[in-house]
Amino acid sequence: MNTRSVRFRVTSVLATATTVLVTLVGAASPAAAGGGPATPSLSWQACAEGPEAAQCAVAAVPLDYDKPRGATIDLALAKIPATNPAGKLGTVFINPGGPGGSGVGLALGGFGEFLRDNLDGRFDVVGFDPRGVAGSTPLQCFASEADLEAFFAQLEVLFPYQRAQERPYFDTWQQYTRQCLARGGAILRHMSTADVARDMDLLRRAVGDRKLTYLGFSYGSYLGNTYANLFPRNIRALVIDGVLDPRLWSSGWQIKSDRVATQQEFQEFLRLCDEAGDDCAFFAPGGSAARWEKLARSLRAQPVTLPDGSTYSYDFLIADATSAMYGPEDWDAYGEYFDVIADAVLGDQAAAGRIAVLRGRLLDRLHPAREEPYDNGLDAYYGNQCADTEYPRTFAAFSAIGRYADAGSRFGPYWWWQNAPCASWPTAPDRYTGPWTARTSAPVLVVGNYFDGVTDYAGARASARLLPNSRLLSYAGWGHTAYGRSACTTEYVDAYLLTGALPPRGTVCPANPNPFLSTAATRAARQAPQTVVPAPWALLAR
């Protein structure tokens, strides 16, 4: 549930990490003397890419924690070393969300250095690819990228918005699940967030930290929440930003949030566009909301034909509007994009010719093109999500909840129908579904934005209420996650990670200025390294 969305690459930094499947015996350590899992031995070496000082390693962890001395898998790690060794406090682990996001890519893509410097060089910053993701024994459902693309060419829509589209869409995704179950191998049964949390505790031991320091974004909040409840006595400092309500996520009812959250932020997009006037390209005398409704109704009735003969349809419009909600720093560009689409719908052929170019630029900003032979982001997303959450098993039940999602907003079906593969995907036997109320050894800092269209503010409030030893830090602005976007929020998070000092109760950081206006705050947020992994299905039709 990455703009402050994604700018990461899941290219492995160690060739061995991309090819490992499952080894039979892990290297033992004294910690394993009693039969528990061995503490991994990390041999840090220069990374194949990334900053010059970056170091990479591979860690062997149990495939199945019920058999801690049995088969092992390999996890890829990347470290941005501390620059103040005399004042070093330890290691801060980071996760960019997804699920399916690369922690290695986050560390090497600029955020690792950004965070290290914000923390006065007193921490090593370590990102790891969760099990099944990118360089960590990756789940791969197809033999090649070409086979993956050929399979998804069967999908006629990004999500069904007409009743006749629902059954073919659902059935295609069940074929995908069958493909993954047939080809996924041993890792597929062991990709739950609980196992990722167990891995992270072993990595904490491996770097020599007595307790964990962690910063997790979006789905990374669910990983942080899971760790806090499985290992409540092992926390030094834990920050979750862009927070999922763990009860909704684990139960399959995240749609209760999704059906309204994106619409709430999009209404702010339209309101601020009107407030900006001519500085927002989508502004119209009758109001942006009226123009948007006319555009959405028109495309739902009939796609617009582009000069190359392809079409731009309603499902693309909703997917693109959802992507815009990740980062208000790009709202000026999205305003121009929606303006061009609206003109094209009215018959402007020159505008129609610009749609594909503008969309390509926006997607590249959201998620730069990757170069690895097989991008397993989609497989990894479902490998984890379906392992964690039990969804309805029948088409009839999916369709009924689809109507509930649609009643919430135009964005509800977009979010709901992407869960279709999980209808026939078995949950992991070791998944964690609560309780979510452990008292932790140190306070958990919970960060939530008032207008987050991906993980709504209610998720942050819920987590803060559930965790008895926590503090809620609010940001009164827009976008998915706040760290690096809001200077106020960033300063409070940095202080907490360094010293454990919490913001005063009830702290609300002020919103940045109107994102459609060129201001120092918007320019600074745009320059901050990006942290959050967007939904992988948004990229199926690049």
Image (spheres, rainbow, N blue to C red):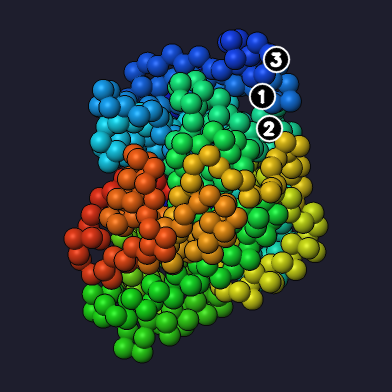
Quarter location, residue 351: bottom left
Which element is circle 2 on? Answer: loop
| Front one among 439 and 66 | 439
Residue receiving disc 2: 190
Residue visible at 34% across and 39% down?
498
Disc with the residue nearer the chain's start (1 vs 3): 3
Q: Name the mark nearer the viewer: 2 or 3.
A: 3
Q: Position of residue 493 (x, y in %)?
A: 36, 48
**Lower position in the chain sequence, tag 2 or tag 3:** 3
User: Quick check: 13 above or below 169?
Assistant: above
Distance between the Cα atoms at labels 1 and 3? 15 Å
Disc 1 is placed on an element classified as loop
The residue to which callout 1 is attached is 63
Mark 3 belongs to which amino acid? Gly
Contact (CB < 8 A) between labels 1 and 2?
Answer: yes
Q: Quadrant of residue 157?
A: bottom right
Q: Is residue 168 above or below residue 191?
A: below
Query: Which of these two is toward me, 235 or 172?
Result: 235
Q: Position of residue 31 (x, y in %)?
A: 60, 15
Q: Which residue is at a point 34% across and 36% down the rendered structure image?
A: 112
In the image, 355 versus 98, the foreground residue is 98
Pointer 3 residue: 35
